[in-house]
Image (cartoon, helix red, strand yellow):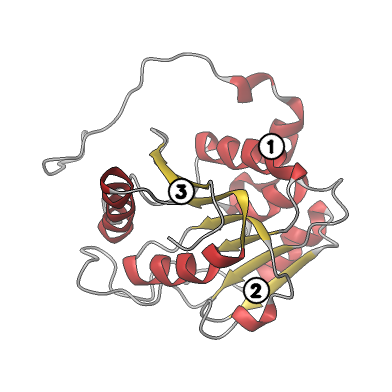
Amino acid sequence: MNKQLPAGYAELRPIADYAPWDTDRSFLTAYNRIKDNTLVDIYRCYSLWQLALQLRHLEGDVLEVGVWRGGTGALLTQALRDDPTCTIYLADTFRGVVKAGPRDDYYKGGEHANTSRETVEQLIAAVGGERVRILEGIFPDETGTGIDASRLRMCHIDVDVYQSALDVLEWVWPRLAVGGVVVFDDYGFFGCEGVTALGNELLARAQKAPVDYIFTYNLNGQGVMLKKASKNF
């Protein structure tokens, strides 16, 4: 049965039929190891996988905020297994969504608390995450100081609500290398209107005046922000 969605939302069925993940053995091996520990579908997982591989030429580490049970963090860990210079930071409260506010219609706080640090540690150990550091607490308020890196190449934001996503972005952006990418996992999903609003603010700003980024909407649901110059947004 179709979901009842408001204006501006629809169940998307793109007509393209090229599915490169279906024959990417390295990805499928990695994905099958983590798929039970994530709510992120294979399409978004493949996007993260490909971005991580393409950004290996940049200096800097990788940050994921909103880890839940560790699936996408473990996927990124496997993608970057052969890069000895990159630390993967996985930040989560492990007590559910925080900073829900008036821009967030669905989330009230505490959702997705059905996880634990131990769950993530076990998965990371299983995939061989020697360069992974887990940051437990609200990011960046409580755990931003746990990141040693002065430079990041990629940040995956999967926090569901406006203020949390904005706070992460404002912390990350000055540290993001030119050519680096921020992925908003929740941008295209009903129920995550706060993150959609933030992405639309960034998009509107880019349409009105010169900015140091490009923002685009991937029809798999992710908003992707590419840094093209070295200045604050």
Secondary element type, mark 2: helix
Q: Amino acid at mark 1?
A: Gln
- Note whether 161 is above or below 55 in the view shown: below
Badge 2 crowding class, 10 Å Cα cut-off, few under 14, some 14 to 19, many 20 or more, is: some
The quarter of the displayed image where residue 89 is located: bottom right
What residue sits right under mark 3 in the picture? 213
Badge 1 crowding class, 10 Å Cα cut-off, few under 14, some 14 to 19, many 20 or more, is: few
Q: Which residue occupies the foreground of this view, 132 or 148?
A: 148
Q: Which mark is residue 54?
A: 1
Closer mark to the observer between disc 3 and disc 2: 3
Q: Which residue occupies the foreground of this view, 196 or 200?
A: 200
Q: Which residue occupies the foreground of this view, 231 or 187?
A: 231
Q: Earlier in the sequence, mark 3 or mark 2?
A: 2
Q: Earlier in the sequence, mark 2 or mark 1?
A: 1
Residue under the point 69% across and 32% down? 28
What residue sits right under mark 2 in the picture? 117
